[in-house]
Amino acid sequence: MQENVLFDRITLVTPGADGQVTVRQEAWIAVKDGRIACVAPDRTSAEGALEGTDYVLYPGRDRLLLPTFANTHNHMAMSLLRNAADDLALHNWLFDVIFPREEKLDYGLVATGSRLALAEMIRSGTGASADMYFYHEAAIEAALEAGFRLNFSVDAKRPDPSGAAVPDERILSEQIRRWRSEPLLRVSLLVHSVYLYPQAVYPQLAAMAAGQGCTVQIHVAETAREVRECLQQYGRRPAAQLARFGFFQTPTLAAHCVHLDDEERAILARPSVYVAHCPASNLKLGSGMADIVALQEAGATVVLGTDGPASNNNLDMYHDMRLASLLGKGLHRAAALLPAATMLKMATQDGCAALGYADSGLIAAGWQADLQVVRTDSPGFNPPANPVNALLYSAAAADVESLMVAGQWLMYKRALQTLDEEKTRFEAEQAAARLAP
């Protein structure tokens, strides 16, 4: 349920329309009907924007208010496979351990795993996420129950009489028609990677995305092995071959992009493409380190993702935001690269745009009330001399006190409001046991 809220003299940290991150001390922020009604220096102005309606007063002492994070690459229900297979390279991890267990999945298991992932994300400041997985309607059910923004991907293929998977545009168009009026949801086309389908399928999927004007979620150049095998099969590297198939003409969430050459960076710099950088997963799987500085210099828009909770092994955007910055500095031996303001914008405003939420990701009148409240009175946060830097280099997920999406509290004073956390954990343990070998 939406609530009207008046934040009382809180420190506001937000990207702005000019792309810069600003800090306002002792700000009054009014939330009405799911949106930011007013950002003001005094109570009278902010209260006036509430037009005499009842509201909750939220004290802002020792608190920061910032937009919720947007996780641009995720496989939510893989929370059930967390800690099931570690210290393996990607292809061994996928084909030897993960894929066999995923054959046991059903709608209920995916719904349970999705709820567990949503609870974790809400607790760590995230209010919107991409999702690429099976049984997408189970993820939708969980997200709507939680009041969470979800860009879900549709596997728009069906088996033909021989059992081969063939693209069917009707599957995608039906999902777009069904969910277009739900403000929390966005629809994408699932294209796993350049290596998983027969060659003839790819141009059909690219044409489908173009015909529907639909975002594509895809893994690109995650490992050196993927690049090597793509060169052997097609004579081109993954991003170049996908472009040849017709991809990157519509909005695209291109995950990983670890092993690229200059030609591929230029392809990924197209205005409709967002590179979803997943530093923790890439490191854990031994896949390498994406050079996001080089991508930015080529003109690409880089956003942040955790990847799935089975290869990270958590969904903490504070952790991945910090790791991405530190890796870039270390890779280029330049401490000034990827500063806190850049990373915060990447995790909020840019990430929301990548997921299709154009009016979320900053705090200004008329924008969605997708907000997180962060405590600054923990020992690890003090002293918060520079709030923007503190959010990147000092903050932890446990510092997130409250979170709202579209004016609805999903967590209030560390208590989840829309999900039963104890029930979710219990059901997830039972579900994980069903997937064990």
Image (cartoon, grey):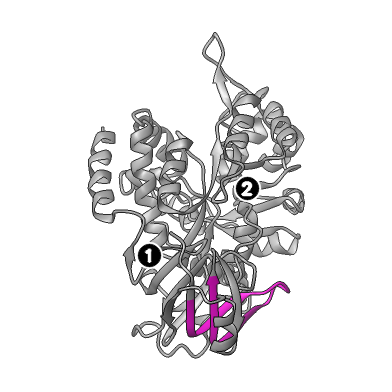
Residue to which mark 2 is pinned? 254
Q: Is residue 29 magenta?
A: yes
Q: Which mark is residue 316?
A: none
The magenta segment: 6-31
Where, quadrant-wise, is the C terminus in this rendering?
Answer: top left
Where, quadrant-wise, is the N terminus in this rendering?
Answer: bottom left
Q: Residues within 10 Å of mark 2 (few under 14, many from 20)?
A: many
- Residue 335 image-quadrant placement: bottom right
Residue to which mark 1 is pinned? 411
Vertical position of residue 79 compared to residue 280: above or below: above
Q: Is residue 85 visible?
A: no
Give whichever of discs 1 and 2 has the lower sequence position.
2
Q: Residues within 10 Å of mark 1 (few under 14, many from 20)?
A: many
Q: Is residue 290 magenta?
A: no
Task: Provide the secondary structure element on which disc 1 rests.
Answer: strand
Amino acid type, mark 2: Ala
Q: Could you tell me residue 327's position as x and y percent?
A: 54, 67
Q: Could you tell me residue 154's position as x and y percent?
A: 56, 35
Task: Provide the secondary structure element on which disc 2 rests.
Answer: strand
In the image, 30 versus 312, the foreground residue is 30
Q: Is the C-beta separation of discs 1 and 2 under 8 Å?
A: no
Identify the main secondary structure in magenta: strand
Q: Residue at x 34, y 54 (%)?
A: 419
C-alpha distance separating marks 1 and 2: 30 Å
Vertical position of residue 425 compared to residue 167: above or below: below
Q: Could you tell me residue 107's position as x and y percent?
A: 38, 32
Q: Residue at x 60, y 59 (%)?
A: 351
Q: Is residue 21 left or right of residue 380?
A: right
Amino acid type, mark 1: Met
